[in-house]
Image (cartoon, rainbow, N blue to C red):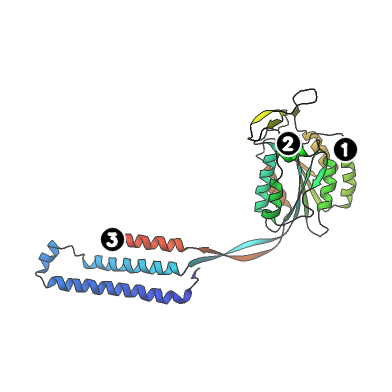
Amino acid sequence: MLFFNYEEYKILVYSLSSLIFVLYLFLYRRKATWLRAFGQKTLINRFSNIPKIYRNLLKGTSISAACCAVGLTLLQPKWQTTQDYYEKEGLEIVFVLDVSISMLAEDIKPNRLQRAKMEISNLVRELEGDRVGLVVFAARAFSLLPYPTNDYERVFLRILNMINENYVRFVPYGTNIGNAFILAMNTFSKENTRKVMILLTDGEEQIITRSQVAEAVKLLLERRDIAIYVVGIGDPKKASPIPKRDREGNVMGYEVTEDGETIYTKPNPKFLKEIADMVGGTYQHDATGKELKHIFEQVIEKHKNIVGIKKKNIVKDISQYFMGGSLMLLALYFIL
């Protein structure tokens, strides 16, 4: 449906456009009468450049319509459509992200950590009405948000962007998944909403992990309302070195052991599936980084709860179309 911000001035625009058309015809008629006074009509038509009557009607119509389009543009035309949308109950989603040094391996481009951050960011930007939290872990887990938030741009994404290579090298070395589970469960609110935990890691096993997971399982028996997804990332068929970079981002070497041997990292899907089974969760693995988007979307789609269908009005500014039409009409006027 077409409408204008200043509907009350439409009649003025139409009146002025009609007046321009009448004035054009009047001037044409006056010019034709003036030329006839000089001699025969056939001679005048041969040596003058006077348009025919039908061309003058077209020229008058085009110039008045062009002025009308310009006037309507000033009235700020809008186009409104009505669209159905599904009203859904908001989810609580806590992302649990591995920030151990092995996540800097580049078997996935640009590296495991950056690819995970990119896909989390892309997913969060598409959310609407859901609340998100963030827990990171290496040898210890840290909650970067005290409670889930729906302020995606100013809070969640800003904090997520702070996690970089310098942050990874600052946290204690290791991959303590059990501690991450326990802390993430305490991040959820006590509200009666659907809750989803997405843990993303390369899954290199550490000795401390199994006892911590056993403790997490006890807590999960009391919190059956949390759906858990364990997502592995990295190529499980190939061990990759962990690069060290300078301030300009150039590789200056690779992580080494105390004996000077290069450290290689390889994801452990079997271990991660075992962990997922222990906590009653679902496990999926992405060896290339290309499946993360699909995995995340699947999880959200599975748990969203449609509570109704509502209509919303979509209003679009179409001033540019009116201005474009006026330019085309003016071009037609000069061509005729």
Q: Residue at x 28, y 59 (%)?
A: 335
Of callouts 3 and 1, which one flags the residue occurring earlier in the amino acid sequence?
A: 1
The residue labelled by disc 2 is 103
Query: Which one is closest to the eye, mark 1 or mark 2?
Result: 2
Image coordinates for residue 65, horizontal then vertical, percent: 35, 68
Residue where numbered disc 3 is placed: 334
What secondary structure is found at the residue carrying circle 2?
helix
Mark 2 or mark 3, which has the lower sequence index? 2
- The mark found on residue 222 in the picture is none
Question: What residue type is disc 3 on?
Answer: Phe
Proximity of marks 2 and 3: CB atoms separated by less than 8 Å: no
Residue plotted at (82% across, 44% down): 141
The answer for how far apart the CA atoms under marks 1 and 2 are is: 20 Å
Could you tell me which residue is drawn at 85 percent across and 47 percent down? Answer: 182
Viewer-proximal residue, 149 or 321? 149
Q: Nearer the viewer, residue 197 or 148?
A: 148
Image marks 3 and 1: residues in contact by CB distance under 8 Å: no
Q: Amino acid at mark 1?
A: Arg
Local secondary structure at mark 1 = helix
- From this view, report whether residue 201 is shown above or below residue 331: above
The spot of residue 150 in percent (x, y) is: 71, 57
Where residue 21 appears, as percent x and y from the top left, is 30, 72
**Proximity of marks 1 and 2: CB atoms separated by less than 8 Å:** no
Q: Quadrant of the C terminus?
A: bottom left
Q: Is residue 27 left or right of residue 42?
A: right
What's the CA distance linking mark 3 and mark 1?
Answer: 82 Å
Which residue matches tag 1? 210
Residue nearest the viewer, comparing 140 with 309: 140
Snapshot quadrant of residue 200: top right
